[in-house]
Each structure stands twice: as structure tokens, then as C-alpha cells.
Amino acid sequence: MRPENIKISAFGPYAGAIDLNMNELGERGLYLITGDTGAGKTTIFDAICFALFGEASGGSREANMLRSKYADDDTPTFVEMSFTHGGKEYFIKRNPEYMRPAKRGEGLKKELPNAELHMPDGKVITKVKDVNSAVTELLGIDRGQFSQIAMLAQGDFLKLLLADTKERQEIFRKLFKTECYQTLQNQLEAERKKSYVACEDARKSVKQYISGIVCMADDQLMLEADKARAGEMVIDDVMELIEKLLSGDLARKDAARQQIEGLDKVLSEVNENIGKAKQLEKAVADLEKARAELEKELPREEGFKKAFEDAEKELPKKDDYSRLKAQIEAELPRYMEYEEVLLATGKLEKDIVALEKSIEASIKAQEEKASEIEELKKELSGYQDVGANKEHLLSEKKGLEDRKDKLDVLNKKVTALQRDEKALEKAREEYKDIDRIYQEKNGLYEHIFKLYRDGQAGVLATTLVEGEPCPVCGSRNHPSPASLSMEVPTDAELKKAKKDADIAREEVAESSRKCSELGSSFDVSLEHARREYEELVGDIITSAGAGSDAAACGTAADSGIGKNAAGGGIGKSYDGEGQLFSGIDYRNDMKGPEPLSLEDMKESSEKLAKSLSEKISEVAGLIKAEDQRIVRKAQLEKIVPETESELNKLKELASSLKEKLAADKSRREADKKQCESLKAGFSFENRAKAEEKIGELGFKVTAIQSSFDKADKELKSHAQKISLLKGQIKGLEESLEGAKAPDMEALLTKKSELEGERSLQTDAYTSANARIESNEAVRVGIEKKQKELSQAEKRLSWMNSLADTASGKLSGKEKIMLETYIQTTYFDRIIARANLRFMKMSDAQYELKRLEEATNNKGQSGLDLGVIDHYNGTRRSVKTLSGGESFMAALSLALGLSDEIQSSAGGIQIDTMFVDEGFGTLDSDSLELAYNALAGLTEGNRLVGIISHVTELKEKIDKQIVVTKEKSGGSRAVIVV
């Protein structure tokens, strides 16, 4: 994958849009990314990562944090990148989530993340999720792998160099996905603990079962049972003891059972004799009771016969009462008809009163509704011209808003110019300070130079001999030789003074250049702002003074614009009253304008903006009122016909009510006549009196019949009872004839003795059976748990071996875990690849070596790193390397790691790489070696970008991306080749 062109907008420190044509850097070789600290050098790589994967290169910033804080609200945030992969061209564009101004109305709206990928065949993939999947599938790697392959950051690869085994385990676990081996180690350890717990649980269960052994208190095996329960007996002896206990209790249980069976036979015979004796006693008692009952009932027979005959004589009266009752019941429908007609007449009376009131209310409602319609029509006539001014007001409001927006933009520019003005003043003050320092250092240098020169003449004069030629002028006469000064400066002092003066001179020149650039830029920007101000305010004045509409004129009048407009150009001038027109004034004396200051422009634009805002609000209020009138007119146009329809319905209702009233009155007269006709033929005053008589006759009929039925029932029941008693007495007498009474007391005594003996045998049987069941359960439980314990102990044994092996805890062995052992394979390949560069960078002095043995067998080992010094044949820790040597070693290791990750990812080829900082720790020779090693990375068609401030690299590498901070905020980047 090689980027061809990158466009970044409002991203990170870049406030505006920058366009980087990466093709200008060539197809291969090194290029430098340099510039101010914090300007955004690494952000270029972040932009590439974001374009491809929707994330920055590091994990410290979320995608929704990538919006530039320096960007204007209207500047969109996005990254566009065209790139080639596999000989084909692709184009991708993304934007993160950020807040932007709403397109309609005021306030902010969330811009959702979006992405699109243009394929070589013209197909366009959209939606963030689909684009992410397509890029990962295309490149064969994810964002994390891409960052590890394409971006080598100093802090990261130094961390890998100096890490111990435990730290490298964490690093390699993420890089090479070895979590499964760590998971296996953890699972084995968990299984070991689980097996140990299973063994302990089985042992506790066996012990608990043994504690449940039961034994008779007087059994000779009691001492052995106590010993077993106390845990003082081996399992085999415990099992033998249980067998003995079971055997003894089985014998006791069988003996008790035989005794119980013999006692049950004897008890059965005794119970049978007792039952016969009880039956005989009961028969004698029943016979005496029956004879007494018969003697009591025989005298009552005549009374029952007399009552029956009296009731039978009353039966003819019942028929008379029934006939009279039937006659009255036949007349009841006429009473009911009378009551229904009377009830209907009463209801009609109420309905007639209600109808009369409803008709009256309907007439009143018609009058009110007619009055309401008249008022609504009158109000509607006042809205005939509604809405005519709305379009004009909307146009007027838009014009005011446009001028307000332009004023706001101008105000921002003026504010920025004020900051630039302060920066210029500060630069000029700094120039004065630097120039003063230069004058001091240059004066000191000239003074030292004069002393040095005079001192050299004095030294030469001491060597002159009269008559011998001077080595300078050749004269043989030396009338006035120079004297030797005691304050002659040394060559070093002279050189230092000259160097200080030269540096100060360069700083003065640089400061002067900076002041000149700032001044020129400020003057141009100020002049541009003044022209823009003049045009904008002139436009506002023209609009306000045109008098085209009331709102515009009102705005001009309120803000003071347009007064004395003939006074000339825009400047700091006054009207005849000496008052400023919202910061825009005109000279009436025609002497020409004085240029406005930034403060005046800012004050004026703010006043104008405030005035326009007030007028915009006023016009918005008029528009809102006009909208309300439009809504009200529409409501009235709907309400008037609806109200007229309601009036018609009221009229129809009144007509129908009058018709119903006439019909109800006619029916009321007919019902009254019918009531009078029905009432003339009644035997009783009303239906209640008739029903009362019917009830009275019915009661008499029922009473006569009930008396007869009762007398008949009682006579028959008494006769039946006499018959039953006589039969019972005869049967009992026959059963008792010849019977002999047994000795009940003797039978009960014998039964009690037998039951007591049986209870003792039952207790013995139950106790023996309970002990048998308990000890049998103990025997079965011990056998089961002993088998489980044996299996658990075997599993624990081999789980201990597996867990100790996988976690590197075998006694006397190297402490290498299974995951670490797997990681050593990757680490050895990384070291082999790293040494190809490290040997070259260190001029064949150093070679990285994985330490296979730890200093002791207590700590984890396997991923420790050492270095072989081929100059003296020693091997030592990488932590003993110097700063520059550590950088070269770490860089080599990082490059080896990058190669290995590419290889592990299926040989993916990334044609672009970035190396971030760290070169400042190298001396010139080491820097040359590192430079040559990095140059070797460009073999094929690979471009390698170095992010650095080192001056030597700037001199060595011509192709550069220069990133600088802008004075107005934000950064910019340009390619220099």
C-alpha cells in the first residue's frame, strides 16, 4: 500500500485544508518530516491511519476528538487519500463525528461519521462498517498491525528493548495472538485446583459416612465402632467392622420377627373371644331398650288417629277458597293495564314539559349562533389583505442577516489583526533587546580585538634588535617600538568574543527579518481590512438611506448611519453636533478622512452589528405577527361555514321538537280516557288490594292442606315404628336363647400381657432394622466415595504435572511457561531480523541474543534479551548500552518486529513506513550508520519517512515535508524536494 495524494481538512492541528502530493517524494528512498514541536508531524501518519481504518495511529485519541480546535465553524473535517495497492488505484474519504453549524436555523448539529471507498472497477462502497471491512480485507491487516508495521515510535521500541520477560509476554500476546496458550495455562491451573477440591471433598465424605456407623450400646463391637468413628481405623478394617455389625443385627431382627408372628396368633384368638363377649352384652342391652320403647309408644296411637280425622273434615273448605282465589287472579291483568297506562300518562307529562323547555332553549341558541356568525364574518372581513407583506418582510430580513454575517466576519478579522498588531509590537521590542545585546557583544569583541592586536605588536617589539631588519616592515632602525601590555587576550578569548558577536549579529538579522515580515504582512492585512470595511459600511449606509422600506430606513436611523452622508469618505470624522454615527463618521469640512484605527473599526462594526441584530429581531416579530394573522384567517374561513351549519341544525331540531310536542299532547288525552274506562269495572280499590286478598286465600288453602298432610304422615310413621320395635324384640330374644356369658376380665388381662410382649419384640425388630439400614447406607457410601477418591487422586497427580509444566513451575527446571515457549519462536525470528540491521548500525560490534537461561530458577525466563560485544567477546544485558547504542538496538528490534508482523500477516507488503524521533541521542558516526541502515529499508519501492529535528538529517535528506505553525492558529505542511 502506497499513498499517492493526501488531503487533510480541519484535522488535528491543521485548521484549514492541506494537500500533500506524495508522488513528489518519488517512488523510493528516505524523506524527512520536520518542523516545529507540536506542529503536527505525526498527525500526517494519523491521517493515513484514519483514512484507512477510521482511527488514529495511537489509542490515546478517539475519532470524535480529531476535529481541529483552530478551524472555523464552517470548515468541514475530513481526510481524503488516493493510494495504490497491488498495482491498482483506490480512493478513500472519511470524516469523524463532530459538531457543525446547523444549515437551517441556529445552533449546532452533530455531523455523523461517514466513509466511502472507490474501487478500481468504479464501484463505490459506503457506510463506515462496510468500508472498514473492505479495507481490512484489501490490505490483509487491521489498524493495530498497520501501526506496528508502518510506524516505529521511539518510546514504543525502547519499551520493547528494555522490557523483562513478563513485560514482553504482554507485548507479544497482543502482537502474535498467543492468548489461547495463556488461557490453556489458566485452565490447567483451574483444573488442578478443581481436582484437589474433589479429592478433599471425597475424603470428607468418607469420613462423614464413617461417623454415621451405629451400634448397640451393649454390643461387644462398641469399642471398635468408637475407634472407627474417631478416624483411628483403616478403611479395610472399617468395612470388616460394618459387616460384623450388619450380621449381628440381621440375626436379632430375624429372632424378633419370629417372636412377633407367634404372639400375633395368640392375640388373634383372644381378640375373637373378646369380640363375641361384647356382642352378647350389646344384644342384652338392646333387648331391654326395645321393650321399654314399645311400652312408651303404644299409648300414643289413639291421639294420632284423632288428629287425622279432624284434618280430613277441613278439606272441603280448601276447594271453596281455591275457586275464589282463581276469580280474583283472573282480574289482575286489567289492574296491570290500568297501571301501565297511568305510568305512560305521567311520563308523557314530563316529556311535554321537557320538550317545551328544549324548544325555548333552541330558539335562544339560534339567536346566539346567528349573532356569533355575524361577529365572525365581520372579523374575517378585516383579514382580506393578510399575507401581502410577508414576502417583502422575509426579503428585508435576509438582507439584514447577510449584512450582519459580513459584519461578524469582518469583526473576527479585526480581532485577528489586533492580535497580529500585538505580536508585531512584541517582535519590535524583542528586536530592540536583541540589538542592544548585539551592540554590547560586538563592542566587546572590537575592544578585545584591539587589545589582542596591540598585544601582538608588543610581543614583536621585544624581539627587535637595533640594526637587524623588522620581520614586519624590514626596517633596521626601531626608533619607537610598541610597549608590551599586561592585558593581552588569548586566542580562545578572541575567538569566543567573535563567535558571540557573530551569533548576536545573526540573531539581530533574524529578528529584523521577522519584524519586517510581520510588519509587511500586518500592513497588507490592515489595508485589506480597511477597504473591506469601507465597502461593507458603504453598502449598509446605501441600504439604510435608500428609503426603499420602513424597516431598512429604521435600521439606518437607529444606528446613526446615513446622517450627513455628503460629508465625504469613511474616516474618523464628526457631524455638526460632534457625535459619532455608531463609529462611522464623516467630515463636513471636506479635509479628507483620517484612517480608522483597528479599535475604531472594531467598535464601529460591533455597534452596527448590534443595531442590525435589533432590527432583525424587529422584522422577525413583524413576520411572526403576519404568520399569526394568516393562521387566524384560515381558521375563520373554516369556522364560519361550520357555525352556519350548526345554526341550520338548530333550526331543524326546533322544528322536530315542536312536531313531537303536538303528538305527545294528543296521546296524553287518549291515555287519560282509557284510564277512566278501566277503573270503572274494578272489584277492589287497586291491584295491591286485590293481590292482598289473593294472598290471604292462598294462605288458608295451604294451611288446610299442610294440616292434613302432617296428620297423615305422623299416623303412618307411628304405625311403622311399632312394627319395627316388635320385630327387633323378637330377633334379640331368639339370639339370646341358650347363650352363656364369657369371663371378660380374664380375656382383657391376657390381651394386655400379650400386647406388652409384642411391643418389646417390635422395638427390638425396629431398632435392629434401623441399624441395618444406616450401616448398609454407610457401607455403600464408603465404597462409592472411596472409588471416587481413588479416581480423583489419579487425576490430581497428572493435573499437577500438566499445570506445573505449562506454567513453568517444575522444580529445578527453567521457569518457562507454555505461552512464553511459543513466544520464543517469534522472538528468535525477530532477533534474527533485527541483527541484520543492528550489526550494520553498530559497525559489526553488537549482536542481540535471547538469554535462554535465567540468573536463577525462581523467576520466569525465556524472553530476556542480552547483547554480544564482538569487540571484546563479552555478553551482557541490553540495559548496559549507552543512549545512542540503545536507540540503534531498539530501532533494529522494532524493524525486525515490523518485518515479522508482515510475515505473520501473510507476507503483506507496506510500501510506506514512518520512523519517529530518537536520532538526537546518536553521535555523527552512529547517525551515519543508522542512516545507512534506514536507507536499506527503501530497497524495492519503499518510501521511509523519518520524523526528526536533527540538523544532520536535514542536511542529508533533500526530500522533506515541512510542518510549521501559523500565527493565526493551526499548522500547515508543504513538500520540499
Image: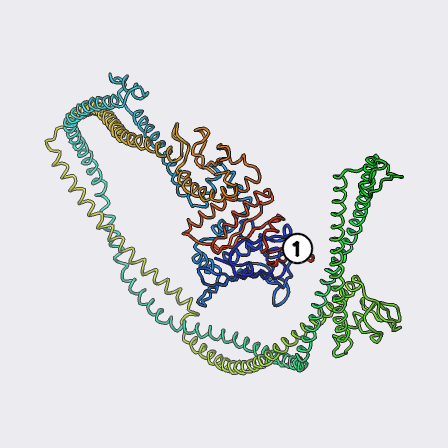
- The residue under label 1 is 965
Q: Depth check: give the residue in front, 847 or 800.
A: 847
Count of numbered tags: 1
- Where does the image place residue 816, in percent across and percent down from the top left? 41, 34
Quadrant where the image shows the C terminus: bottom right
- Toward which corner of the image does residue 525 lie, by quadrant? bottom right
User: Quick one: label 1, few (<14), some, or many (20+) residues within 10 Å?
Assistant: some
Residue in the image at 45% along x and 63% along y: 88
- The answer to whether 816 appears left or right of 159 in the picture is left
- The answer to whether 50 appears left or right of 376 in the picture is left
Of helix, strand and loop, which one carries label 1? strand
Q: Specify the amino acid type for callout 1.
A: Lys
Residue in the image at 21% along x and 43% along y: 298
| Residue 112 visible to the viewer | no
- Toward which corner of the image does residue 5 lie, by quadrant? bottom right
- Where does the image place residue 253, in percent across and percent down from the top left? 20, 25
In the rendered image, the residue lying farthest to the front is 467
